[in-house]
Amino acid sequence: MYKIIDKLLQRGEYKKAHKLVIKELSSTKRIDNKIYLLKSAIFICLREHNVSLAKKYSEQIIVLADKTDDVSFKSIIYHMYGLTLFKTGNLIDAHMNLKKSLYLSRQANNEELEVKVLDSIGKYYEDDGEVLNAIYYYKMSERKKILLKDNIGLAITYGNLGRVYFESGDIYKAKEYFQLDYTISKNLEDYFGQTIMLNQLGDVYRMLGHINYSEKSYQSALDIANKMGYELSKGFSILGLGYIATLHDEMEKAKEYAEKVRKIFESFNKYDGKIDSLILLSNIAIRENDMEQAEKYLLRANNFAVNAKVNFEISKSLFETAKFYFKKNEVYDGLEKVDRYFQVMMKLSKSEFSIFRNVLALGEELVGAEDALLILKRDRALEMIKISPGLRNRFKISRQVLTSWEELHERVVDKSEHSSSREITNWLRENKYISKEYIAAAALCREGEDFGYIVAMNNNPFLRSFDDTLNILNVYACKVAEVISTVLSIELSRYDALTRLKNRESLDKEIKDEIYKAVVFRKNFITLMIDIDDFKEINDVYGHQLGDFILVNISNILRSQTRETDLIFRYGGDEFLVVIGNVNRSSVEKFVERLLEKVRKQNIIYRLSGLKITISIGGYIFKGSEYSEDPESFSSKEIIKKADKSLYKAKYAGKDRFCLYDEGQEI
């Protein structure tokens, strides 16, 4: 009977499993059986968000702690009791019980139980807004599950990691983990897991502007939810389709969806669903110019979020409310929400991706601009950051490193608002970075020193006079300057100051992650070592300023030729390291030839007699599809060493070429 219950739980057939659990509970006398059945009952209730019933079961399981001497059973009891306390909002006692469970699982040397507790502690930190701690525990769980070959548990951990990255603004990382979870859930025929991941992927695609993919994901999730009777998953699918309907201007359909989900989430008392449905209703009201009703929806969403004490939900409602007040031209109410929004965001995530994107999005809304960009100082260079154009792709930001900061900064001699804005505008136009007719720029200042500018742009005149627009933009720049400065400081610990590529600090950990994923999913990845040929001579003959320019240009080429999920590091002075997942020899050959040719073509830019810019590349393919050993037995240093050895082969063979480890042949 217990094997049948396990199978039903794996497939997400919770109602059937629950009936069997209740039947067995009424007849069993054995303590170990009772613990197993109560654990299963609590798991089902929490999955279906029936917290009140989970609490009743948890009160039954905790009294069994003194009736068993088995350390593993004690760990299970404290784990399930801690989980239920966590869900009922008793965070201090929840944390204490979860830590106790972790200690007992390790004392029992029960790794299968330990990884489940690690996931729960990760979720505790996630909901408390401690993202780095959450990722730490989830990653510990992931490594152990890979070694245990626990695919069911691994799917859960990947979903958890995807959610953390999503909430902290790293959408591409979130997408990667959601897809990994979905792949495993599909292979295991876990229908509940599939609906959750399809809904999550729908959210990701919607944010990235892939509306067709988003709609298909939501609809596929809804089809499974209807078939399996997953009412809550059905609610999130309909919610997503409601947002899609607003993007298609199908407002009647959107209202119909919104009313359906409101009833579902009310019946489950699901705070995140309630908040999202209220934001959807506010969006509909704004489209219909019913600003009074829109404000009521947003204030209710804010209240739900604050009462739930979940930073991600609080930040989401504050962001939408700030935009709303800007639309109403209630600037100072909106700026007050901006202050609170960034206070929460800095607790939740200091991700440069989400912070910069939202600084720009709110800035556009504030002054009624079609576009906005940030210009930030990067060591001796500067970086331009903007949201990619197009209504359906407003989430993605593009980043371009340029030289040099001094060239721009020295032009802004007069620090008055009008003069500063005019000089920035002229510089942008002279270098053909923008083509908009109407431009306003405000300085970002830290401790009396400018470190960047925020620029708003329109093809048509701004809604307010230029003076008013510039004044408001300067007030906004003062409010966000500290946030941007903090993010830049954090970035400096992880990124190279000149090129804004990752530095070597996280290299070992990130390659190790790729090894684990390659082994689990039987995929290959390549590590490329790239070196600029004769770079020392270039610096000696033409100067370090040109050397910096070349480093920046090659960094931009690497960004343009790789995917968002690929890894690029500045490894040393003139060396770069690139990690590309899911490759074969043919795709590698095409990639490196394209890269070599792109760099060769850069020589046209410099127009200097005798100057020739080329790169040499060495690579090593880690074949997860053929690797059967423990992933811990293969080190990142070994991979880098093999790629580096191939690089030297390419150098000795004449430079401006690629060599692959073990192949030893030019491509």
Image (cartoon, rainbow, N blue to C red):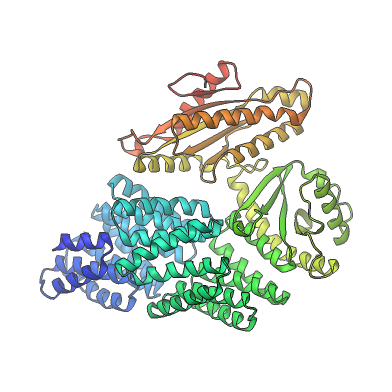
Which residue is depicted at the point 39% across and 53% down?
158
Residue 443 point in image, percent of width and height: 78, 58
Residue 474 point in image, percent of width and height: 78, 64
Give whichever of 214, 7 is nearer the camera: 214
Residue 243 point in image, percent of width and height: 52, 68
Q: Is residue 281 left or right of residue 373?
A: left
- Tell me the quarter of the picture where residue 79 sits: bottom left
In the picture, which quadrant includes the N terminus?
bottom left
Relative vertical location of residue 430 with respect to residue 100 in this rendering, above or below: above
The mark total stands at 0
Relative vertical location of residue 361 with respect to residue 644 in this rendering, above or below: below
Residue 633 point in image, percent of width and height: 35, 35
Relative vertical location of residue 535 with respect to residue 25 in this rendering, above or below: above
The answer to whether residue 409 of the structure is visible from this angle is no
Which residue is depicted at the point 31% across and 63% down?
100
Relative vertical location of residue 341 with respect to residue 444 in this rendering, above or below: below
Give whichever of 637, 513 is nearer the camera: 513
The answer to whether residue 232 of the structure is visible from this angle is yes
- Tell me the quarter of the picture where residue 468 sits: bottom right
